[in-house]
Image (cartoon, rainbow, N blue to C red):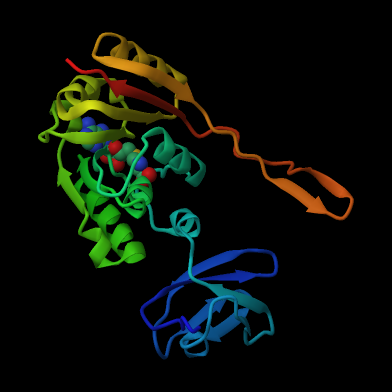
Amino acid sequence: MSRALQAGELVLLTDRKDRRYLTTLVEGRDFHTHAGSVAHDELIGGTEGMQVRTTRNAELTVWRPTLRDYVLKMPRGAQVVYPKDSAAILMQADVFPGARVLESGVGSGALSLSLLRAGVLVRGYEIREDFAQRAIENVTSFLGSEDADRYQVEIRDCYQGIEAEGLDRVVLDLPEPWQVVPHAATSLFAGGILVAYTPSMVQAVRMREACESGPWASVSTVEVLHRDWHIKGDAVRPEHRMVGHTGFITAARRLSD
Ligand code: SAH
C-alpha cells in the first residue's frame, strides 16, 4: 500500500540523536541542517520511515509529523498547552465528535488542534488579533482547510460574556478564568463541562471558589506529571530531567436549574 509523500505536505525529519526538523515539501527546494542538505525531490514520492543521507553523509528519517511533533515545533505567539496536558484536557472535558465547544483564549492554537482532531466544533474567543491569525494558520497548516472549517475564531474578550447558547463544553486557558464561570453557566447545557487550565495554583483556587457559588458539581483539580524512562541494556531508570511544572486542570459539571 502506498501513501507516498507529496509536494505541499508537512514532513518531520529526525536524525540519529532524535533531533527533529519540520518542513513543507516543495519541488526543487533543499532542506539544510548543520549536517548537510537533502533535496526535497528525494523525499517527494517516498514513504514515511524512509532513510536518506545528507550531502555530508548524515542519516535522516522522514515522517509525517504527529500532532505532538507539530505542536512542539509550530510557530507560536503565546505559550502553548503541552501535549500531556492537552491529552488530559480532552478526557476531563469528555469531548466527542460534533461537540459544540467554546475555547478561550486560543493563543497559538495548540489546544485547538487537539480539540479539532477529536472532531469538535470549536468556537474560539481571543482578544489578540495577531494570535487569532497565528492560531488559524497553525490549524490550517496541520489539519488542512477542510477540518479548519470546524474552527471559528472571533476577536472577543471572554470576560465580557459568551454570545452562544447550547454549548456542550467550555475550555479556558486565560489569566482569570473565574471571570468566565458565570458566562459558562448561562451558555452550557445542563450536564455540560467547564475546564480551565491554569499555570498557578492561586488561579486554580480562585476558579474553585467561583464554582462554589454557582450551579456546579463534580469539581476537580488535577496536574499531570509525565516522566520519561531511560532504557538501555541494564541501565533502566527514570530520565534525569523532566518538565516539572506546566499547569493545573480544573473541571466542573453544570447542574440543571
Ligand atoms: N491554549 C493556547 C494558549 C493560550 S495563551 C494554546 O494551546 O496555544 C492565553 C491566551 O488568552 C492569549 O492568547 C491571550 O491573548 C488570550 N486572552 C487573555 N485574556 C483574554 C480574554 N479576556 N478573552 C479572550 N482571550 C484572552
Q: Along the line of sight, which residue is nearer the eye, 179 or 236?
A: 236
Q: Along the line of sight, which residue is nearer the eye, 152 or 241?
A: 152
How many numbered marks, from 0 up?
0
Residue 78 shows in the view: no
Q: Residue at x 25, y 43 (%)?
A: 99
**Above/below status of 114 relative to 27:** above
Report which quarter residue 29 is drawn in: bottom left
Q: Along the line of sight, which residue is nearer the eye, 67 or 134?
A: 67
Q: How far across and how far down the image is residue 132, in percent? A: 23, 50
Tell me: 21 left or right of 103. Answer: right
Tell me: 154 left or right of 203. Answer: left
Tell me: 184 left or right of 252. Answer: left
Residue 31 shows in the view: yes
Q: How far across and how far down the image is residue 33, in percent? A: 57, 75
**Above/below status of 69 relative to 112:** below
Report which quarter residue 93 is drawn in: top left
Q: Residue at x 38, y 83 (%)?
A: 7
Q: How far across and how far down the image is residue 45, in percent? A: 47, 88
Residue found at the far right of this picture: 234
Tell me: 189 left or right of 140. Answer: left
* Ligand 1 image-quadrant field: top left
**Above/below status of 183 relative to 109:** above
Q: Residue at x 24, y 35 (%)?
A: 168
Q: Along the line of sight, which residue is nearer the eye, 98 or 225?
A: 98
Q: How far across and how far down the image is residue 34, in percent? A: 61, 74
**Quadrant where the C terminus is found in the figure:** top left
